Image (cartoon, rainbow, N blue to C red):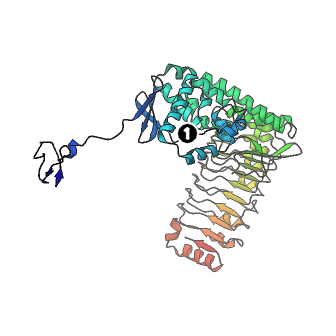
Amino acid sequence: MLFCPKCGTRNRTTYNFCRKCGTKIKYSIEDIKSTTKKPIEYKINDFITLKLEHDKTVIYVKNNKFLQCKYLLIEIPKDRIKDFDGFTSIDDISEKFDHSLEYEMKNNELKPEVEFWGHCSNLQAWTENLYDTSLLHSNLAFPLLKKLTDVGDPMAQRVFKDEIAERLTNLYTNVAQYLIQENYFEYFNGEEIESLMEILFEQIEKKFKKKYNSNLNNTEIKALLSIIKTNLISSKAFLINRLKLVDVISKETNMGFLQENKRIIALGFNRCGLKTLPSSIGNFENLEALYLTDNKLKYLPPSLGTLTALKKLDLSDNLLIELPYEIGNLKCLKELLLNHNVIQVLPESISILKELEILSIWGNQLKKLPNNINKMKSLRVLGLSFNQLEVFPNLPSEMPNLEILDLSNNKIKTLPENVGYLNSLKALWLNNNPIETIPSSLLELQSLTDLYIVNTPIVVNKEKQVIKILENLVAKGINVWK
């Protein structure tokens, strides 16, 4: 039964209208009026509007949805007001208290309407103070200011660059790092960037000298700062990270140095976007290790040759086309790593490096080696994989200490008999070369333990002589990998 809401008369369930008074008693879905509340809306100015939608505060810019606010960032408790004396921005407060106030706000579970009006109050104050970014957290203030600039807000366009520059003046804050990483420099023209970089470099210089003036030689301080200044515009890494004294230097070091008796003995600039190495690199007279890996260097200055105390030089993963002739002056160099560059020719002077033990040139464009490379008597490891070599290098008995020779992934077709002169050779890589045969002189190598011939015609060669040599190598206990 259905009861009439007007007169109370009982009606059959099949009736649409009351049989007594005619009032409609059965409703379709179309007859039910929406009970959804009208969204609360607050207009900040002609460009910014806030709306409370589904209990969430949403910012609209020029009537387009821009961002949903997560929660009020902080609320300063009355009993802790003195804790906030001296702060100049919301970001300062957030950094000081390690986001603890954010969690407190989330746990307070403010009513959506209360939180909405809190956001409105914050943004109203922000606009009334000419978009002062210190009044909002940077991860809201700058994206919103950027958006307002893009849509033509004249006030935003006037203050946008000034706000960025002002917050960058304290270079190593979280806000400055955020602006750098999010590429806010793209809004500045070339002249403006140069001016800004001068200011930022002055900060770097001031902070570095203040910290290390008493620990380092003045000439070397200037040389370090010269490397930074030369690459500052092309690489934001120098703005994000600090050059500092570290305990260990390796290719994992981003920017660091080791010092002894006020002189730098090891230096690392890895993954810094280095495009230019200034001539001041030659001022590190006591430098023993230099790591410049994973950068964008194409050329090296001749002054590199003045680093006569250098023992290890790692230039891997750059864009090097050539090496300076002066590299032959590094008389103490024991390890030279040039992997993954685009070097086509090595200077003849490299053969002067009498102390060099490890020379690795993987992944370059070498077509031949210097004629006198066999004069490098101390060489133990020679890595030449992934190049364009067509001829086996001239390596006679003058290289008595060579233990590892990697010639894999080249275009070498023949292996000369004089390979048998390499008495100390332990491992020989020939993988992925068009070599069809091997000389019997390999059997004379008393130290050989491993021969790699994977993916070479040797493997499928049916000549009895080749098969016999391989069998004899195996009989001697040599691992033949094929």
- Front-lying residue, 202 or 381: 202
- The residue positioned 67% from the left and 72% from the top of the image is 449
Residue 410 higher or lower than 171, as above or below: below
- The residue positioned 59% from the left and 51% from the top of the image is 363
Q: How many residues crowd mark 1 within 10 Å: few (<14), some (14–19), many (20+)?
A: some
Inspect this view and state whether residue 278 appears: no
Q: Which residue is mark 1?
A: 72
Question: In the displayed structure, does residue 448 sit left or right of residue 458?
Answer: right
Quadrant, the C terminus: bottom right
Question: In the displayed structure, does residue 352 sit left or right of residue 299?
Answer: right
- Front-lying residue, 67 or 76: 76
Residue 132 higher or lower than 327, as above or below: above
Q: Quadrant of residue 318?
A: top right
Q: Position of residue 23 (x, y in %)?
A: 15, 42
Q: Position of residue 297 (x, y in %)?
A: 65, 40
- Front-lying residue, 456 or 359: 359
Quadrant, the N terminus: bottom left
Question: In the displayed structure, does residue 462 sit left or right of residue 199?
Answer: left
Inspect this view and state whether residue 479 appears: yes
- Front-lying residue, 286 or 51: 51
Q: Position of residue 367 (x, y in %)?
A: 59, 49
- SS at circle 1: loop
